[in-house]
Amino acid sequence: MTSAGSSQSPEASVPTDASGAQAPDDSEADEAATVDELVEQWEAEKPPAAGTASNVAAAVVVGLLGVLGLLGSLDLGVGAASAPGAGTWPALVSAAMVLLAVGLAITAPRNHDAEKFSGTSWLVVLGLATMVGFAMTVGTVGFEIPAALLAFVWLKVLGREGWRTSVVTSLLVTVAFYLIFVLALGTPIPHLF
């Protein structure tokens, strides 16, 4: 036995839990942040909020795209509930866009979730531009090349993945889409092979 005044060995002073395993020390507990602390940290680090004018502008853009989509889907022919036409699904999506745009315009003054346009916002524009490029070229050269390029750009440029990951994943995604949609499902999409 040790007396109250004697020093104990370092091993004897290590706290243990009920099972005898070493309990985490206070420094590990201090590193683990609580949910409230994480929320405070994220709030402090988030980009500035967009203003009411930005929210209204976004609502107008979404609303206009929805209206254009509705007009295009009417040209395709919506059909009926029992016999939907080619424009049925685009009409439903476009109508939802218009409704969401109205909702965004109504809540614009109270909405503080949208981020102010910044340099990283251009990545969204680039993502949209690559989707438009994909849609414009898939009918001419098939889906394989545009799909591989789209996946590569999204992985390498937007996702900042490495070269090997971007190349291999974009090729694997394209092969998987080909196997699923062309071979297995027989989907009538333009393809090279």
Image (tube, rainbow, N blue to C red):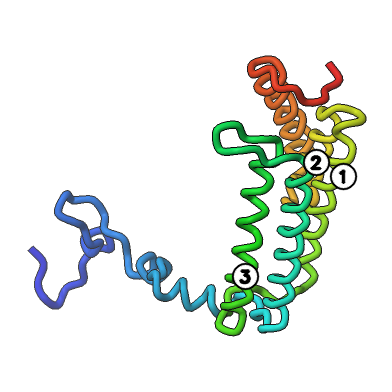
Q: Nearer the viewer, residue 171 or 33?
A: 171
Nearer to us: label 1 or label 3: 3
Pick the quarter of the image with the C terminus. Answer: top right
**How crowded is the residue under tag 3: few (<14 C-alpha within 10 Å), some, or many (20+)?**
some
Which numbered tag is attached to residue 38? none
Residue picked out by circle 2: 150
Name which residue type carries label 1.
Answer: Gly
Tell me which corner region of the image, top left, top right, bottom left or bottom right, holds residue 46: bottom right
Pick the quarter of the image with the N terminus. Answer: bottom left
Q: Alpha-carbon distance for marks 1 and 3?
A: 29 Å
The answer to whether 131 is drawn above or below residue 137 in the figure is below
Q: Residue furthest right?
A: 140
Tell me which corner region of the image, top left, top right, bottom left or bottom right, holds residue 177: top right
Which of the two discs, 1 and 3, labels the residue nearer the N terminus? 3
Which numbered tag is attached to residue 133? 1
**How crowded is the residue under tag 1: few (<14 C-alpha within 10 Å), some, or many (20+)?**
few
Which of the two discs, 2 and 3, labels the residue nearer the N terminus? 3
Q: Nearer the viewer, residue 22 or 51?
A: 51
Tell me which corner region of the image, top left, top right, bottom left or bottom right, holds residue 152: top right
35 sits left or right of 147 in the view? left
Residue depicted at 87% across the width and 44% down the height: 133
Residue depicted at 64% across the width and 67% down the height: 101
Q: Position of residue 158 (x, y in %)?
A: 76, 53
Q: Position of residue 126 (x, y in %)?
A: 82, 56
Q: Nearer the viewer, residue 172 or 88?
A: 88
Q: Position of residue 47 (x, y in %)?
A: 65, 76
Residue picked out by circle 3: 102
Name which residue type carries label 3.
Answer: Val
Name which residue type carries label 2.
Answer: Leu
Q: Alpha-carbon distance for marks 2 and 1?
A: 9 Å
Nearer to us: label 2 or label 1: 1
